[in-house]
Image (cartoon, rainbow, N blue to C red):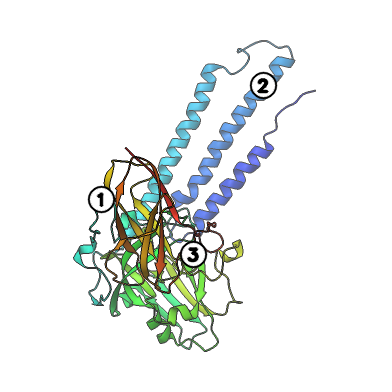
Amino acid sequence: MRSNKTPSPLVAAIVIFSFLGALSAAERTGSTWVSIAAPCIGSLVGLATALVMLWQINNQWLLKHFPSESHAPLGWDRRRFIRTASSASVGAVVLGTLAQNGEQQRIDRIEAQIPDSLPPTIDSSNSYEDEYEYEYEADVAPGELLYITPNDDFYRIDTALSFPNVNLDTWKLRIHGMVNNVLELSYQDILDMPQVERTITICCVSNEIGGPYIGNAVWQGVFLKDLLERAGVTGDAEQVFSRSIDGWTCGFPLEVALDGRDAMLAIGMNGEPLPLEHGFPARLIVPGIYGYVSATKWIKEIEINKWSDAMGYWIPLGWARDAPIKTQSRIDVPRKNQELQAGMNKIAGVAWAQHTGVEKVEVRIDNGDWNITELSDDLTDDAWRLWSYEWNATSGKHTIQVRATDKSGYTQTEVVTSVAPDGATGWHTRKVVVA
């Protein structure tokens, strides 16, 4: 009985994925014909390649099972295989290059709108000066332990596969919902407002113990509280619900925006206009709560509403609605499995308890006594503090642990928990070898 291979399932799959790719590209404002046509052309090349290969497979089955005049050796003809594979490869390379060039041109057009500089600030009360290059006085490699995280090294967590389109000629931030006055602010409107500057550490809820998804930057913009007071929030509102240009959403308690903390609509980062990858033209920065409920990049809308009116992107997926950042600490020096020399060595890292502040950091070696570390200047409760400890190391394998105590008196727990649903807990532990 003939077991002929049918192309229908493969053809259907290619067509469906092609349609979804073209639809996704078309939904982005300002998409070019290249970004929409690329998945369609790719599907045609894929279909042609798949049909040729299926024809070859079916043809070989016929040749094996029904006598006929031989025109080619059984199995793949080497030259035919090379031609087919080469054609498919060339098509893939051409389409990939077209798509890559189209995407890069799109990004270049967006970044060309970013201004060269920002207006001066009227208030920089807790931002660190000295060109944002503060390095703790620790015996570590240059740049290994910085108070301010450079823009290029700042962590990024996005749900989108590419940057959304931004057109400053049409972009506006709309503040609406349970307010007395609906506001629509252009980028120039925001630039014209009195600018403030604050040093704030932000952190992703998916940051594992000792993980890299945290950074400290000097943010420039306007206070969110001032914008909401200008809009006139009504008395029964509960949530600040924001939406990005690409449709991402999040929400946090209204009282967090109004309790006096330096929640900001930021347009600048470390002395520069906000980079595209970090949310140009504007984003939210809210000290003390995780980014998945607050740090909307590429923001276009703030709606004041009730909790029952809307849920942010991550909440239906099982993450906590309320998300205060947990007191944590991390060992950065020495590195994991680093081999040290016996004698005095520096142990150093960072600790954070945003909007509460770090009171002390302790280190212990091999389950011994806890030792108080030296802390960097206490510039603000909303940013991390750097710490260091001089260790007289002896030969052998050692385990280093760190814990922080915040200004409320809470010392971080040693109980290890997952990042879900509201952030990881536990002491960061690092193993080293001393020669």
Disc 1 from disc 2: Cα separation: 67 Å
Q: Is residue 284 left or right of residue 78?
A: left
Q: Position of residue 70 (x, y in %)?
A: 65, 10
Q: Earlier in the sequence, mark 1 or mark 3?
A: 1
Query: What's the CA distance linking mark 2 and mark 3?
Result: 55 Å
Q: Amino acid at mark 3?
A: Tyr
Residue extending furthest toward the right:
1
Compared across the picture, whether 303 is left or right of 371 comes to right
| Number of other residues with Cα within 10 Å of mark 1, as a class: few under 14, some 14 to 19, many 20 or more | some
Residue 28, x across and y down, in percent: 47, 59
Mark 1 = which residue? 140
Quadrant (top left/top right/bottom left/bottom right) for the C terminus: top left
Can you identify the residue that label 2 sits on? 59
- Looking at the rendering, which quadrant does residue 120 occupy? bottom left
Whether the residues at callouts 1 and 2 have beta carbons within 8 Å, the answer is: no
Helix, strand or loop at mark 1: loop
- Front one among 196 and 364: 364
Q: Nearer the viewer, mark 2 or mark 3?
A: 3
N-term mark: 2 or 3 = 2
| Residue that carries the numbered disc 3 in the rendered image | 292
- Give percent across and percent down for residue 196: 29, 76
Which type of secondary structure does the marked residue at label 3 adopt?
helix
Q: Residues within 10 Å of mark 2 (few under 14, many from 20)?
A: some
- SS class, disc 2: helix
* Dot 2 and dot 3 residues touching (CB under 8 Å): no
Q: Amino acid at mark 1?
A: Val
